[in-house]
Structure formats: C-alpha cells, structure tokens
Amino acid sequence: MAKIRQEKSILGQISDLSHRLVTVLVVPIILSLCLMLFYAWQYDSAIARMETIASLKSVVSEEIPGKAFNIVSGRETLRESRIYETVHSVEKTIEAITDQTGQENRLSLIVANRTMQTLENYIDRIRDNLEAEVPVVENEAVLSEVRDVAELVESMLNDYITQEISSAANMSVSLRLVIFLTAGLEVLVVIGAVWFRNRSVKQTAASVRLPIEQLEEAAESIAQGSLEAKLADTDVTELRNLTLQVNHMADRLKTMMEKSNQDARNLRKAELRTLQAQINPHFLYNTLDAIVWKAEAGEKDEVIQLTSALSDFFRISLSSGADWIPISQERKHIEGYLKIQQTRYRDILDYEIDIPEEIGEYLVLKLLLQPLVENALYHGIKNRRGGGTIRVSGRLEDKDLVFTVKDTGSGMTPEQLRLLNERMIKGQPSVSEGNGGFGLVNVNLRIRLYYNQTEGLKIESSNSGTTVSFRVPCMTREEIYENESVSGG
C-alpha cells in the first residue's frame, strides 16, 4: 500500500516545536521549584515548632511554679489559679509538636511530656496536703520539687530547640545543594534545548524550503510567459493552498492572455471600422463634388482650400499607421474636417477651435476629437432648425489634458443620454444602430484602453445642446516610447 502523506501546516510544526521546547524547559524548572518549596516548607515548619516550644519555656519555668507557690502560700486556691488547665495546655502543645516532629528530634519532647506528668503528680500532692491540712513545711518541700521538675522540662525543651536548629541548618545546606544542582541541570537543559531547537528548525525549514523553491521556479516560468508549468502537491497546508492558487492563477492568466489577444484584435477591428466610418465614400464623394462645383464656378481659392483641407484630413487620418500624434496635428485634422463640412453646411454650421499652441507638442491618441466633432454635427447641428455652433477647446490642467467638444444642437433626451451611457459602459458599439453614438462609444473605449484609466468620455446634454469632454494624462514623445517599450508594444 502507498504511504499516506500526512498534511501539516507550518503553524502546526512551529506549534509542536514550541510545545516541545516549553516541555523541555519548564518541567525541570517545575521539579526544582517543587523541591525548593518542599525544603522551604520544612524550614518554615521547623521555625514555627521552635517558636511554639520557646513560648512554652516561660510557662513551664515561671508560670507553673509561680501558681504552685501562690497555692502553697494561700494566696490563691487551686480553682482560682487554674494551674491544672495550664499544665494540660502545655502537655497538649508538646504532644501536638511531637506529632509534627521527625523521628530524630522527638525523644526530647516525649521525655518532656512524661516529665510534665511527674510535675502534675507533684501538684496533686500539694492538693492532697491542702485537703489533709498538713503543715506548710511539707508543701514547701513539694514546691521545691515542682521547681526542680519545671527546670528539667525547660532543659528538655531547650534540647529540642537545639536539635531543631541543627536540623534546620542541615536543611539549609540541602536547600543550597538543591539550588546548585538545579542551576547546573538548567544549564544542561538550556544547552539541550538549543540543540533540539536548531535540529527542529532545520527539519522544519527543509520541509518548507523545497515547496517554496518549486514555487519560485514556477513563478519565474510564469513571469517569462510559460503558463504551462504546474506545481506538484505538497503536504504543507499553507504552501499546498498557495500551490493550488498559483496553478489556478496560471490557468487564469492563460485565459486572460487569450482574451486580451482577442480584445486587441477586436479593438483593431473597431479602429478600422472607425476609420471607415470617418473616411466613408459619401464624405469623399460629397467633398469631391463640392470641389468640382467650386471649380466650375471659378472659385479658385475655395478649390485650393478644400483640396488642401481634404489632403490634410486623409494624411492625418492615416498618419503612416502611427497611433499617437501631436495635438497640433489633431487640431489641424478637425480644422480640415470642419472646413470641408462648412462648405457643405455653410448656412447652418459655425465652429470655433480653442486649442493653445503651447500644448501642441504633447502627444495624444489620434482620432479622439474628430469623431466627437462629427457626432456633434450629424446628431446635433443638423437636427436643429437654423443650425448652430461647434466649439472645440483644449487646455492643460495640472498634469492632464482636458478636451471639450460643445455644440448648440438639438441635444438628447434623458432617456437617449441614459442609453448612450449604458452602451459606453458596455463598450460594445454596433454600426447597425440608428441612434448615433457609434463614434462616441469607440472613442470612450480607446481612451480607457490606451490610457489605462477607468473614466473615458463625460457627456452632458439638454435641449440647448450637448457637451462631450474627456481628461487624459499629458504625455511627451519620450514617455510614449518608454511606455510602449515597457508594455512590449
């Protein structure tokens, strides 16, 4: 059976590595901390026991003999002195401390507790003598014994404290030893953790590096135009997703490049249709007829002017196949067109051209203004009774060129303007449409494609006329050549 590849994310590998490092580093620290806390607890317990026993010493050596003296001298009764409660309290305390003490130090407390029983017996004798009303001299002898026994108990308590101090000193030595051993162990653990980390990092890097190198090779192939390269699958989750996306991107780029080539062919066809629409036979026939009429009428200057205008029109329209021409030529182109059309529509057509000479050397995409002028004439001026005026203007605004073609024709209805804007957004002109705007749609599409911008023509219209404007970057000949070389054009 084939071995199943286990998919694991980079984050998962890093997480596993961090967990292992934490385990290696934290466990010894926790163990050493537990040991130190244990010794600290033992040390504190010993101190507490010594403090408790030390507090009993004054009770045994001073308070109990003092109460016994008061009883013998008649200053207090047994009930008033509460001597038995004091003795029992000492016994219980010693017994409790004995239970908390280790075997090595318990003997002194055990003997001390038994001696307290002897002390209680002497107090019983004092009680019995008082009840029998024996001479005070006998009780004084017993009182002397009470004092001697109390001193003995005190001595035993001192022995216990001495033993506990010695044990505490031993624990202190052990605690220091544990600290030194723990420090040494931590150094070894850190060294081991560093080695483990380096080894794990190398393994993780190796598992990631190969897929990344494959991604780099594929990206380089795609950058060089080879979209057939496919990446093999990987068991690293993030890189697996990236691999799938790169393969998907290559497929999409291939599809987009094919579509781009098709769009370029469609655009070229649209440009040819635009030229055919501008240089149509009817325009040529009508211009030649006008020249013949002028010649027959003996208007030599008019014939020369029309012929020159027609020559300029054709020359600039073709431009030896160039896409970009100076603004001065574009101005000359629309001027020649308007001169020719004014000969035909003298009674209804006036025009004004306001394009400063200062911007004449900048380059623009050819045939941007002439289709707008033609649209203004055929769909604006001709449809208005009494004719009108076409005004063409251009200006430099910041780093942009702004052109406007305005007519005083019949204008468009809001519905016609909406439909025209929809056609321009779709960028799908149709020469079979009878509503006009074929030139506008093409110009709008060419501006957006050639200048790589989202906005093209801006159209405003009312019953007093239509205004068409657009804004494009101001570009010199050097910038045009640089852009074309970068884009491979």
Image (cartoon, grey):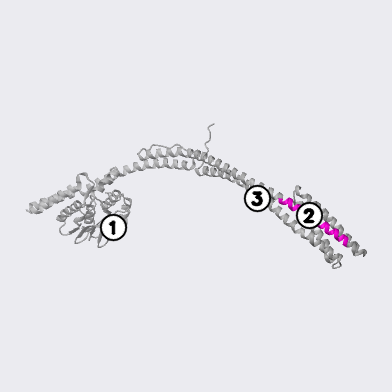
Disc 3 versus disc 1: distance between alpha carbons? 85 Å
**Which residue is labeled 3 in the image?**
37
**How many marks overall?**
3
The amino acid type found where label 2 is placed reads Ser
The answer to whether 443 appears left or right of 117 in the picture is left
Q: Position of residue 286 (x, y in %)?
A: 15, 51
The percent coordinates of residue 467 (x first, y second) are 26, 59
Q: Quadrant of the N terminus?
A: top right
Q: For the view shown, which residue lies furthest in the left direction?
A: 298
Q: Assess disc 2: are there few (<14), some (14-19) or many (≥20) residues with their C-alpha within 10 Å of its C-alpha.
A: some
Which residue is denoted by mark 1 in the rendering?
Answer: 459
Which residue in the structure is indicated by mark 2? 155
Given the image, on which type of amino acid does mark 1 rest? Ile
The mark nearer the N terminus, 3 or 1, is 3
Q: Is residue 58 left or right of residue 179?
A: right
Q: Between 205 and 377, which is closer to the camera in this rendering?
A: 205
Few, some or many C-alpha atoms within 10 Å of disc 1 (few <14, some 14-19, many ≥20)?
A: some
Q: At x 66% / y 47%, what residue is drawn?
A: 173
Compared with 200, 314 (above or below) is: below
Highlighted magenta segment, given as a residue range: 140-165
Secondary structure under tag 1 reads: strand
Residue 287 lies within the magenta run: no
Q: Residue furthest top?
A: 1
Which secondary structure is most common in the magenta stretch? helix
As helix, strand or loop, the secondary structure at mark 2 comes to helix
| Spatial separation of the CA atoms under disc 1 and disc 2 | 116 Å
x and y percent of residue 372 in the render? 24, 54
Give, as a three-letter code, the residue at label 3: Leu
Name the N-terminal-most of marks 3 and 2: 3
In the depicted view, which residue is nearer to us: 123 or 464? 123
Up the image or down, 450 lies above or below 199; here it is: below
Say what secondary structure mark 3 lies in.
Answer: helix
